[in-house]
Amino acid sequence: MIDASTPPEPLAGARDLFALDPAYTHFNHGSFGAVPRAVAAARRAVQAEHDANPTRFINTVLLDRVDAVRGPLAEFCGADPDRSALVPNATAGTALALAAVGLGADDEIVVTDHGYNAVVLALGEQRRRHGVRVVTAPVELGASDDEAVEAVLSRVGPRTRLVIVDQISSATAQLHPVAAIAARLRELGIPLLVDAAHAPGMLDRPAAGVDADFWVGNMHKWAFAPGGTAVLQIAEQWRDRMVPLVVSHGQPDGFPACVEQQGTLDHSIWLAAPAGLDLFDRYGADAVRDHNVRLAAYGQHVVGQALGLDPAELADPGPGVSMRVLPVPAHVAAGHAAGSRLRARISDELRAEVNVTSWRDRLFVRLSAQIYNDAAEYDRLAETLPALLR
Ligand SMILES: Cc1ncc(COP(=O)(O)O)c(C=O)c1O
């Protein structure tokens, strides 16, 4: 159990590794990550190489380089490099999984009520275009692993063709027992997509031991890659059934080339991604994770106390999670639009970047913690946020 009242020691020099605007405090690493200066420099170096001779770079160097980075990025995730492809993001990975499964009228997809908005919208399109039914399993905040597994499995039926579960949810910052859900669904022969958008870099080798049909994790959130870098791991039986969203030169080569090549793209993003992993070596991956988890707990504790929240109202996200949510007072209007307005006010008036999420008719302030944050920043938010929410 973490002692939330004691923040971790800062990691020396970490703040200077980032180009973040000092006029703002950055508590929203979870949404878009932050690119370290060294990663931006690595990317510029690749771009310079490309720009010096695009024909030679693309025809003789690029594909080998993509091959060379896929392995280390997949291994960092605990994924099998031979069953992994680089994709732009979790949204694209989800679309690829949906295309591979190929759902039709009255097929059912089971999701939890913690799912990410863009994924929920993608499922809405499956309903609209193909008549797919979306079945939502409510999972309580702070549910035990057994309760979460049963909540999902209890919605699985004879028409279920796919289950989607977030490894760490966006709106609620909850860790879900995806390995246990995968094992149960494997026995039933029902495919599982794990939306692990937040997992790489936050959790240690998050794909390891998760026997899911599809697992997709963003490297551009917690693994310090430039935006547009994600790992999609598939189970072997899907290799020949992958349907690229954009068919291009890699099509005859099958997975992963068929999903990685999509005409001309800026691959400097993927090629610079390994430089993000160097930050874990610099401090030690365990030290980075320990710092972030403890600082997030501290942030939730001090801001929660300042808001007069009962500690019992503060959701424990589960082990290893470095984002935490705080319920916004019930008198504040709920819904996505109200959440965006509140986020913008906190940014404008407090010069603090947070995420405001919307879940079950309630807004939550979501605070992330990263190596560039320190305890004094959460103390300041604790002083200023209550008045804004009054
Ligand atoms: C759970 C979850 N899934 C999917 C996404 C989408 O990630 P991307 O925009 O990189 O596709 C996010 C982004 O925050 C997320 O939190």
Image (spheres, rainbow, N blue to C red):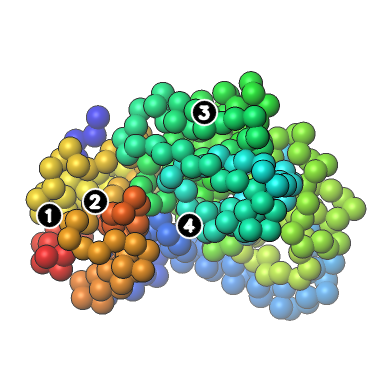
> Which residue occupies the foreground of this view, 73 or 259?
259
Mark 3 Cα shell of 10 Å, populated few (<14), some (14-19), many (≥20):
some
Asked if marks 4 and 2 touch (Cβ < 8 Å), the reply is: no
Q: Is mark 3 within 8 Å of ligand 1?
A: no
Mark 2 Cα shell of 10 Å, populated few (<14), some (14-19), many (≥20):
many
**Residue name at image x 84 percent, y 48 percent:** 254
Q: How far apart are the alpha carbons under marks 4 and 2?
A: 19 Å
Q: Secondary structure at mark 3?
A: helix
Q: Quadrant of the C terminus?
A: bottom left
Q: Which residue is mark 2?
A: 326
Q: Which residue is mark 3?
A: 153
- Pair 4/2: label in front: 4
- Pair 2/3: label in front: 3
Asked if marks 1 and 3 touch (Cβ < 8 Å), the reply is: no
Q: Is residue 96 above or below residue 167?
A: below
Q: Which residue is mark 1?
A: 307
First along the sequence among labels 4 and 2: 4
Asked if marks 1 and 2 touch (Cβ < 8 Å), the reply is: yes
Q: Position of residue 288 (x, y in %)?
A: 37, 45
Q: Position of residue 369 (x, y in %)?
A: 32, 52
- Pair 1/3: label in front: 3
Q: How far apart are the alpha carbons under marks 4 and 3?
A: 22 Å
Q: How far apart are the alpha carbons under marks 1 and 3?
A: 37 Å
Q: Secondary structure at mark 4?
A: helix
Amino acid type shown at disc 2: Leu
Q: Which mark is residue 117?
A: 4
> Which residue occupies the foreground of this view, 368 or 365?
365
**Residue name at image x 19 percent, y 42 percent:** 313
Amino acid type shown at disc 1: Leu
Q: Is residue 362 visible?
A: yes
